Every structure is written in structure tokens, then in C-alpha cells.
Image (spheres, helix red, strand yellow):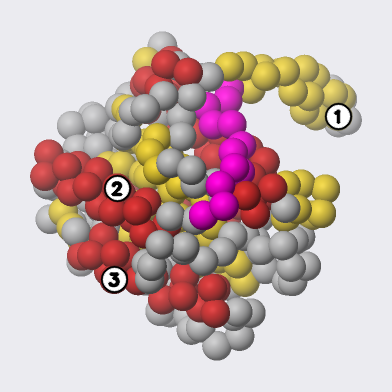
Amino acid sequence: MPYLAKITRTNPTCLLFLVDQSGSMRLPFGRDQRIRKADGVADAINRLLYGFVLKTTSGDYVLDRYFIGVFGYGKRVGSALGGDLAGQGLVPVSQIADKPLRLEKRVKKVSDGAGGLVEAETRFPVWLDPVANSSTTPMCEALREAKKTIESFVTSCPKAFPPIVINITDGAASDGDPRPLADELRQLSTEDGQVLLFNVHISSKELPPIELPSREEGLPDKHARLLYQMSSSLPEQMIQSARSMELSVAEGARGFVFNADLVSVIQFLEIGTQIENQ
């Protein structure tokens, strides 16, 4: 049964985000009109990167069990990380930890020790700034770049847990039909299984979220149906993980979401139970 490889320092895996940076990402997110789509995506990815840093930290060390990349596609296609990581593709998580673009002051609620909550100022690392500056959406080019990057990784780590690619977009590709390229990307594999391609469709429409559907009927438009068709089926352990997060997931579900909260849905990919301290 595939997708069972342990994730260790000697057998790491990788996670690659593809982020739509077209001008329409300046529009408000459908479920929360106070937030621009580009801002919501950047914040979600920064939180996820920070989460990976925390869960791979052991004492004073960050263990390189993951290689992580963030590619933007808009005016240009390539690394969207800032600061010292600008221009880099897949980066070991220890470098993610060491080289944020900046630390922002944020306020969060913490326990007051007496059953209540108080606001406390904290420092939050930022690696990705929101960008929405293009009249085009070169998704096909982004998938080609992803394929090159993932091909290199699976060649160097043939026994790894299969790479996960997460494409986050609010619309259609402007440079052709992305489905054949998505098929090519999903055909790449390690000894543990094929690459997993998941898609997050962010809409400006105030419609209910659709999370991890098992069929395309009921999806709101042709763009959502196309992204569903591009998405990998979920391995069984991810279905169980999603169900443990109280998501309603049928057998045959695909890694596709529409208009859902980014952080809570992407977190269903949690594969930390397969990490070993090696």
C-alpha cells in the first residue's frame, strides 16, 4: 500500500505551493469581504510555514525532514519567497526557520492563568508577501516549473513520501489547458507512490465552501470543475486524517476545496504522525 514512507532527516519529503498572483487576487475573498484573496493566501501560507518550523524543531535544532517551495505565477513564474530566500526553489525547513523576510508584531489571545484570556503581543515570521499584479494567469507555465522541480526531487530522494503540490488560484489559466500538465505532474512518483496534486479554488462569490468532494456534480462553475479534474484522489490515511478533523469525506474524495478557510483545510494534509526522529 503506497503513501506509507516514514518522513525523516535521511528520507525527507517536499511540499510545493503554487500561488496565483494575477490581478484578480486583489478582489475580496468570497466568504469574508474584508480580506483580499492575495492577503488571505499569503497569511495562510506564512502560518503553515511557521507550523512546519515548529513541528520539526527539536531542542535547538530544526530537523530537515521537509523541503518546501513557494512559486508564484503572474507577471513572472518562479520563487515567491522573499529576503535571503528570494529566487530559491525547494528550501530545507531549517533555512525557512533561519531566514524569514521579517518578523511582524501581532496580537493574540493567551491564557491569563485564571481561566480567562488576555491579549499579548507576539513576533510572527513572514516569508511571503501578497502579490496581485498581473493581467494574466500563467498556470500552465507554473505547472511546468513544478514538474521540473519535482522531477529533480524524486530523482534525488527515490524512497521519499511522495511530494505534495498545492495549487491556489481564483480562476482559469490564461496560457492553455492545464489538465494535461497536471496529469504529467501526477504521473511522477517515488517508490512510495505518485505525486499528489491538490487544488484550492478561491472565489469572490459568497457561496458555501465545498471541501474534498468525491464528484464534480454540484461544483459552482467550469473553473471549479476543471480544478477538481486536475486534483489527485486522497490516499486512505489522508481521508482518515480529514475525518478526524470533522470534515465529511467520502471514499474517492479528491484533494480539492472551493471557498473554504485556507489554513483549516490545508491542515488536513497533516502527516506528522509519520515523522520519525532520525
The residue sitting at the front extreme is 135
Report helix, strand or loop for mark 1.
strand
Q: Is residue 219 above or below residue 199?
A: below
> Of label 3 and label 2, which has the lower sequence position?
2
Residue situated in front as seen by the camera: 83 or 214: 83
Q: Is residue 261 left or right of residue 175?
A: right
Q: Which residue is mark 1?
A: 117
Instruction: Tell me the quadrant of the picture where the N terminus can be found.
Output: bottom left
Q: Residue at x 22, y 47 (%)?
A: 148
What percent of the width, then of the height, locates residue 276? 29, 36
Q: Residues within 10 Å of mark 2 (few under 14, many from 20)?
A: some
Q: Is residue 250 magenta?
A: no
Question: Start and end of the magenta stretch?
Answer: 125-136
Q: Residue 180, labelled with which disc?
A: 3
Q: 278 or 253: which is nearer to us?
A: 253
What secondary structure predominates along the stretch shown in magenta? loop
Residue underneath mark 2: 145
Q: Which quadrant is the C terminus positioned in?
A: top left
Q: Residues within 10 Å of mark 1 (few under 14, many from 20)?
A: few
- The residue sitting at 38% across, 67% down in the picture is 176
Q: Is residue 101 above or below residue 53?
A: above
Crowd class of label 3 (few under 14; some 14 to 19; many from 20; radius 10 Å): few
Badge 3 element: helix
Q: CA distance from mark 3 to mark 2?
A: 14 Å
Q: Is residue 112 above or below residue 253?
A: above
Question: Looking at the image, which residue is at 25% across and 43% down?
Answer: 149
Give residue 139's quadrant in the image.
Answer: bottom left
Instruction: Name the residue located 44 percent from the left edge and 20 percent from the top edge.
Output: 97
Percent across and percent down for residue 40 are: 67, 45
- Taking depth in this image into account, of 106 and 23 the one nearest to the observer is 23
